[in-house]
Image (cartoon, grey):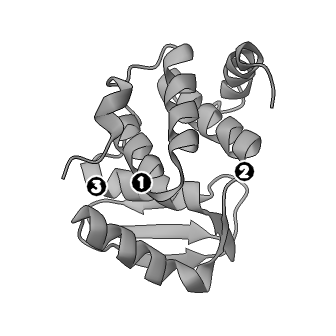
Amino acid sequence: MSAYKDLVIEAFDRAEQFVRCSQEQALTYACEEIIERELGVRIMVSKDLNTWIEKICEREDIDVPDLMVMRKTQSHLASAHIEENRICIRGKNTTAATVLHEIAHISVGIDGHGVLFRDELVRLCRAHISVEFAAMLHGLYVATGLEMSPWPASATQR
């Protein structure tokens, strides 16, 4: 694994590639990509997503969104349509982290990538990928200057 300070530098460099995004959104995306690469994450086949999404939403007490699988595009891996309670995945395979990213949008009911969204994404990653993945994502968000709640807040409160 790369030295942590190198990951922070890389996050700022990668953020520059997201030219149509705010700095906050670009850094959020860059951090997610880096942690996925560094730790790896499960690749999921589109036909298996409905069952997995239903299990997550049941556990998290979230209304299960409709799932649409569409043709792959260069610009978007997936999207959440909050008003319609729908997630669109592009391509026949996607990662667990991408699905959780979209579920986080649905869960908090916002399109943006601010602190509420990031807190929810970290919490979902902690519960459905691993504590290590969530901790590194949280740490990289903080190290790049993105606002986050304290790490203990990411634990599921039941």
Residue tagged 3: 107
> Which disc, if any, is residue 8?
none
Q: Work out whether residue 119 or residue 69 is closer to the camera in this orientation and state it.
A: 119
Q: Position of residue 141 (x, y in %)?
A: 52, 25
The residues bearing labels 1 and 3 have C-alpha atoms spaced at a distance of: 14 Å
The residues bearing labels 3 and 2 have C-alpha atoms spaced at a distance of: 24 Å
Q: Provide the secondary structure element on which disc 1 rests.
A: helix
Q: Position of residue 12 (x, y in %)?
A: 67, 18
Residue 19 found in image quarter: top right
Q: Position of residue 58 (x, y in %)?
A: 28, 73
Q: Work out whether residue 38 or residue 73 is closer to the camera in this orientation and state it.
A: 38
The residues bearing labels 2 and 1 have C-alpha atoms spaced at a distance of: 16 Å
- Which circle, 3 or 2, is nearer the viewer? 2
Say if 41 sits above or below 14 in the image.
below
Q: Which residue is painted at 38% across and 44% down in the image?
A: 123
Residue tagged 2: 40
Q: Which residue is painted at 72% across and 30% down in the image?
A: 17
Say if 93 sits above or below 148 in the image.
below
Residue tagged 1: 127
Tell which circle, 3 or 2, labels the residue nearer the N-terminal end: 2
Q: Amino acid at mark 1?
A: Ala
Q: Amino acid at mark 2?
A: Gly
Q: Provide the secondary structure element on which disc 2 rests.
A: loop
Tell which circle, 1 or 3, labels the residue nearer the N-terminal end: 3
Q: Work out whether residue 40 or residue 158 is closer to the camera in this orientation and state it.
A: 158
